[in-house]
């Protein structure tokens, strides 16, 4: 003989599950509304470097992810050695990677350069061939041989796309030289 399930305990369990589901929907709706109705749809402005002569700030222009960028040590002179590091988690693999860099001073193009960074059968960097989900870090040392008498706010726009046209990184930086 089979016993009948208690209908009272089933109703209580269903009500609890319904309440839990409604609470989850309410929380997700509030989070969604805050995202949709937020005044600021941009990533925060990061200050990378501040010295007597140089200030470097940047903001990711990728709507889906921020990037990490460091500039160490922050130099007082452009002839001082410095290490530049960029880090991000890949949302897509990079068998091929193409970069586009623009440097502007008062809306005038100073430098504009498009360059392949990773090509099939010609991986120039260690991150070439990296797969989705991997953390990649790009590090480079820099030292100007001449301390150029530059002054002003330079705007640097960097975009990188992979072989499928997917945006891998996008950064807008301002380099202020006093």
Image (cartoon, grey):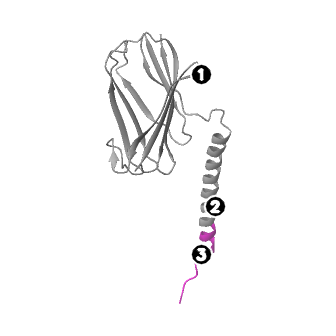
Q: Which residue is mark 1?
A: 107
As drawn, the label of residue 6 is 3
* Point 66% across, 42% down: residue: 36
* Point 63% across, 71% down: residue: 8
Q: CA separation, marks 3 and 1?
A: 75 Å
Q: Nearer the viewer, mark 2 or mark 3?
A: 2
Q: Which residue is mark 2?
A: 18
The one nearer the camera, 43 or 76, is: 76
Specify which label sits upstream in the sequence, 3 or 1: 3
Image coordinates of residue 169 in percent, x first then y, are: 48, 39
The one nearer the camera, 11 or 29, is: 29
At label 1, counting other C-alpha atoms closer than 10 Å, the crowd grade (few under 14, some 14-19, many 20 or more) is few
Q: Secondary structure at mark 2?
A: helix
Q: Is residue 129 left or right of residue 155?
A: left
Say if the magenta span includes residue 3: yes
As drawn, the label of residue 46 is none
Above or below 34: residue 85: above
The one nearer the camera, 143 or 76, is: 143
Above or below 100: residue 147: above
Q: Nearer the viewer, mark 2 or mark 1?
A: 1
Q: Secondary structure at mark 3?
A: loop
Image coordinates of residue 154 in percent, x first then y, are: 51, 20
Specify which label sits upstream in the sequence, 2 or 3: 3
Q: Specify the segment rendered in magenta.
A: 1-11
Q: CA separation, marks 2 and 1?
A: 57 Å
The one nearer the camera, 129 or 56, is: 129
* Point 58% across, 78% down: residue: 5
Image coordinates of residue 2 in percent, x first then y, are: 54, 87
């Amino acid at each position: 003989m089979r016993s009948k399930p208690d209908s009272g305990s089933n109703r209580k369990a269903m009500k609890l599950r319904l309440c839990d589901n409604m609470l989850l929907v309410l929380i997700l709706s509030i989070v969604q509304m805050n995202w949709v109705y937020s005044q600021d749809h941009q990533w925060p402005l990061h200050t990378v470097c501040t010295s007597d002569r140089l200030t470097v700030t940047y903001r990711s222009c990728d709507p889906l992810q921020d990037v990490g960028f460091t500039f160490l040590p922050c130099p007082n002179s452009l002839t001082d050695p410095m290490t530049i590091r960029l880090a991000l988690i890949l949302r897509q693999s990079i068998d091929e990677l193409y970069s586009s860099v623009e440097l502007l001073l008062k809306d005038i193009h100073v430098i504009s350069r498009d360059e392949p960074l990773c090509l099939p059968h010609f991986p120039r960097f260690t991150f070439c061939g990296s797969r989705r989900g991997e953390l990649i870090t790009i590090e480079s040392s820099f030292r100007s041989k001449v301390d150029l008498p530059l002054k002003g706010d330079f705007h640097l726009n960097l975009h990188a796309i992979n072989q499928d046209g997917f945006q891998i990184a996008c950064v807008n930086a301002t380099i202020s030289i006093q």
